[in-house]
Amino acid sequence: MRKERLIVPIIVTVALVWAVAQLISSVLFERSLNQALEDLEARGEWRVSRPENRQGWLTSEGRLVLAPLLGRPWQLELTYEARHGLLSTDVQGTLVPRLGSALQKALGEVSALSLPRWEGRYHTLSGKSELRLALAPFVIQQGGRELDVRGARVRLEGVFGDWRLRALFDQLTLSDGPAFLTFGPTVLESRYTYTEDAYHFIQRDHLTIDSTRLYYPEFEVTAAPLDLQSQMVLDESELRLKGRLELGEVHVPSEAPDTALLSGEIEAELSRLNADAVREIIRRVRLEAAWGDPERPMAEGVMARLEPEVRKLLSDSPRLDVTHIALQSPLLGINVAADGALFFDGRRVDTLALEDLRDPRTRRAWRERIDGDFVWYDAPTVAALWLGLPLGTRELQFDVIRGQWRVNGRPMPELWPQ
């Protein structure tokens, strides 16, 4: 009898624990989703909205809309249905790409055969989220043009403050009549770490394209492979952007199928962009986007309103360091080994104007703030000939003085007619 009397309290306790766990799972999932959307919007690149949301005890569902902050040329609608469990929440839904009215009017109707579906999981205890999207091969047709996607896989995972993305595209082909552009397989790996409201952040991206082919009936260019790495850092004092491009052999098969037109690598870094100005520009642009027309949220006169922040952005005298250039062209018989830097003079930047850059005097005032120098080591004879220098010149020193280019102490000749 005693054991039978204990059964009911045990069942009630287990049911109560299960119900509380379900409720906690639902609440934590909702909080994590809200935090992720706020973090995404804090970067200042996206407009995020949730027009539909129904939070439930066992299940939740809703619809998210993501669009670029500057205008709405396109947007992504994500529907989701979440099934809450004791230790995790399983999520699935559809992904619907849509064009803005301006692009819709310009391009016409664009349609796909089926809606891509995605799935994911949120771990209640650790707060870790995983999202996966697998696309079967599909074709999008529009006005005689065609986008052929031969399968893709996307995986996004992480926790608050640290997200990783890995996307793989087997092959993408954009065709317009007999002309087409094909690239792939393609792999994008990205990691984004940040503090609350993206006050500080680091983003690292690595894009690899195994092969690229551009074809016209009378012309063809191929490149394999292409490797691009970039890093963006916003800290207490500055925003820095560093990039490295490695270009495999570029061929023009119709002209020289066995000899490369170009290959090599370039590495550069942009630094000294004032961090507080970056954060203020992001805040102001988000306000402008919220106030403006949905299709053109940047209202008239926005550059004049942002002018103080843009000037402050340049107040620390930004610099562009091209730390490494190594290009080879066996077809042309030219090699380029060079490095250098450009500097912007940020003193008395309040005297510069942004609103009318079409005015030659305004452009000249900006150009006169630029100084720098580049060195082309072991330059070929033909380069000296182009620049009007003695044929024995082997090193070319390019100087930028108040926006005016000089080479080896001489004014730069006009290479192309105006």
Image (cartoon, rainbow, N blue to C red):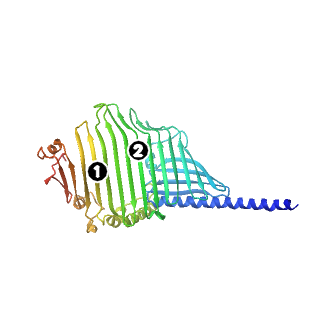
Instruction: For mark 2, give the secondary structure.
Output: strand
Q: Can see residue 74?
A: yes
**Splitting the image into 4 quarters, where does residue 271 fall?**
bottom left
Quick check: 25 left or right of 397?
Answer: right
Name the residue nearer the viewer: 270 or 264. 264
> Where is residue 300 drawn, in percent x and y?
37, 60
Quick check: 66 left or right of 334?
Answer: right
Quick check: 65 left or right of 401?
Answer: right
Name the amino acid, label 2: Thr
- The residue furthest left is 390
**Which quarter of the image is occupied by the N terminus?**
bottom right
Instruction: For mark 1, give the secondary structure.
Output: strand
**Splitting the image into 4 quarters, where does residue 7 fall?**
bottom right
Q: Nearer the viewer, mark 2 or mark 1?
A: 1
Quick check: 357 left or right of 162?
Answer: left
Q: CA distance from mark 2 to mark 1?
A: 20 Å
Looking at the picture, does residue 86 appear above or below residue 105?
Answer: below
Q: Can see residue 296?
A: no
Residue at left offset 25%, top offset 54%: 340
Name the residue nearer the viewer: 359 or 201. 201
Q: Which mark is residue 208?
A: 2
Looking at the picture, does residue 345 appear above or below residue 382?
Answer: below
Q: Are marks 2 and 1 in contact (CB under 8 Å)?
A: no
Residue at left offset 59%, top offset 54%: 122
Which sits earlier in the primary sequence, circle 2 or circle 1? 2
> Where is residue 26 drawn, in percent x and y?
64, 59
Q: Which mark is residue 324?
A: 1
Residue at left offset 69%, top offset 62%: 20
